[in-house]
Amino acid sequence: MSIANNTAFTYWTTIGEQKKINSQKVILCRCKCWTEKYVRVGRLLSGNSKSCGCWRNEKLTTHGQTKNSIRKHSHEYWIWNSMIQRTTNPKNSGFKNYGGRGVGVCGSWATFDNFFSDMGIRPSDKHSLERMDNNAGYSKENCRWATRVEQNSNRRNTRFFTANGKTKHLAEWARELGVSHATIINRIKRGWDVEKAVTTPARKMANQSGAQVERQIPRVDG
């Protein structure tokens, strides 16, 4: 079925021609908030896609029983429930990696309403709940909605190093020194002692093009 331009589907309005992306028929749409994206034609016709998220957002912020009913059947509710199960229920398949190793949930988040009040609606279907410090539990201060790409990046940057009696993850040491994560990793690969690698500020020297680069200190064995 061909969909004409300026056809409305709840909050979506079609603004482009149909095309195929990864064998899926899609069409460029604009939400009433002016967000534009390609939406699968089948989801438009079935009513499964109503907006970029605005429609659901408005429904979640309506008053009375409607709000509670939608919340209890939302993705956010099931994410919260899964979090509670894997941290408190020994019969849950994920318990050994969470509750079983001491990862808990802050007292406030024992109820869904408090969790939802702190975290709100996840930005998109690609976002899930992430703990920024994997050694800490679930709380407002340690959690965020993040995509898989963002989570993978965070895991790479949460390598912990100890120097001068302080233990910090890679991102913190890099930020403190004003260098990139790669600079610290490269230092260690070149044989630097870890404490030296995370506490030595970058020394700059000009290369032939005039760009500023970190001075390469010769490796010393032993």
Image (spheres, rainbow, N blue to C red):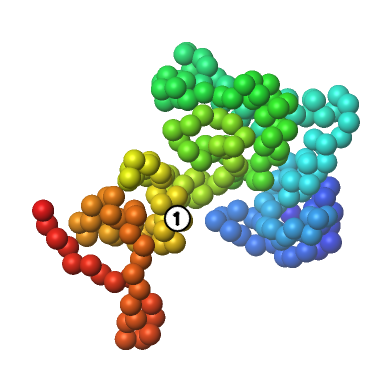
Along the viewing direction, whichever of 151 and 37 lies nearer the viewer: 151
Residue that lies at the very extreme toward the left in this rendered image: 222
Q: Tell me what residue is drawn at x 55 percent, y 37 percent.
A: 142
Q: How many marks on residues?
A: 1
- Residue 8 visible? The answer is yes
**Residue 174 in the image, given as x and y percentages of width and height:** 42, 56
Along the horizontal axis of the image, is 39 left or right of 21? right
**In this view, 5 is above or below 82:** below
Q: Tell me what residue is drawn at x 73 percent, y 60 percent.
A: 36
User: Where is mark 1, residue-wise?
Assistant: 176
Q: Which secondary structure, mark 1?
A: helix
Tell me the kind of residue under disc 1.
Glu
Q: Tell me what residue is drawn at x 45 percent, y 35 percent.
A: 134
**Residue 180 in the image, given as x and y percentages of width and height:** 41, 61
**Residue 18 in the image, given as x and y percentages of width and height:** 69, 61
Along the viewing direction, whichever of 7 and 90 lies nearer the viewer: 90
- Residue 135, by quadrant, is top left
| Crowd tier of the residue under label 1, counting other residues whose Cα lies within 10 Å: few below 14, some 14–19, many 20 or above | few
**Residue 51 in the image, given as x and y percentages of width and height:** 77, 48
- Residue 144, by quadrant, is top right
Q: Tell me what residue is drawn at x 41 percent, y 22 percent.
A: 101
- Residue 79, by quadrant, is top right
Along the viewing direction, whichever of 55 and 117 lies nearer the viewer: 117
Along the horizontal axis of the image, is 9 left or right of 109? right
Quadrant, the N terminus? bottom right
Residue that lies at the very extreme toward the right in this rendered image: 63
- Residue 4 visible? The answer is no
Along the viewing direction, whichever of 200 and 18 lies nearer the viewer: 200
